[in-house]
Amino acid sequence: METFESFEKYDFENDQAFQQGLTLLPKSDDPDFMLKTKHFYYSKYVAQFDLQEYKQYKQQPKKLSFQEIMEKVSKGEEIPGIRQIPLVLQESKAEAVMEPIKKPWEL
């Protein structure tokens, strides 16, 4: 996981060798093209890792510590996995369609 985190923090934008190599590659319609390109470069020149394992790592939700949750709450940020409930009440007034059940003395 440490390798994955350092991969995500790697500055590809300012790596001149990566940027030069990127200009030599043909354009691709593959949605994972940039991820695959970065993976190839990073694995060759920095540290090797398995791309499939990285994709699985990205799909797992990150577990937040209590302190991280408290920081997000104090900043008003969303907490992953928590459903946001709107503060507005529903304004539509629906009319009752069914008749109320009659009480035994009303029969």
Image (spheres, rainbow, N blue to C red):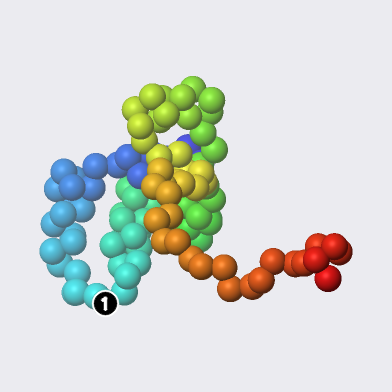
Decide which of 40, 96 is in the foreground and name it.
96
Q: Quadrant of residue 66?
A: top right
Decide which of 33, 70 is in the foreground and name it.
70
Q: Residue at x 58, y 73 (%)?
A: 97
For residue 64, say whether it is visible: yes
Which residue appears farthest toward the bottom when viewing the image? 29
Q: Residue at x 83, y 71 (%)?
A: 107
Decide which of 22, 35 is in the foreground and name it.
35
Q: Which residue is identified by label 1?
A: 29
73 is higher (above) or lower (below) than 22: above
For residue 4, say whether it is visible: no
Q: Residue at x 75, y 67 (%)?
A: 101
Q: Quadrant of residue 30?
A: bottom left
Amino acid of disc 1: Asp
- In-image side of 10 versus 50 (left or right): left
Decide which of 34, 43 is in the foreground and name it.
34
26 is higher (above) or lower (below) than 103: below
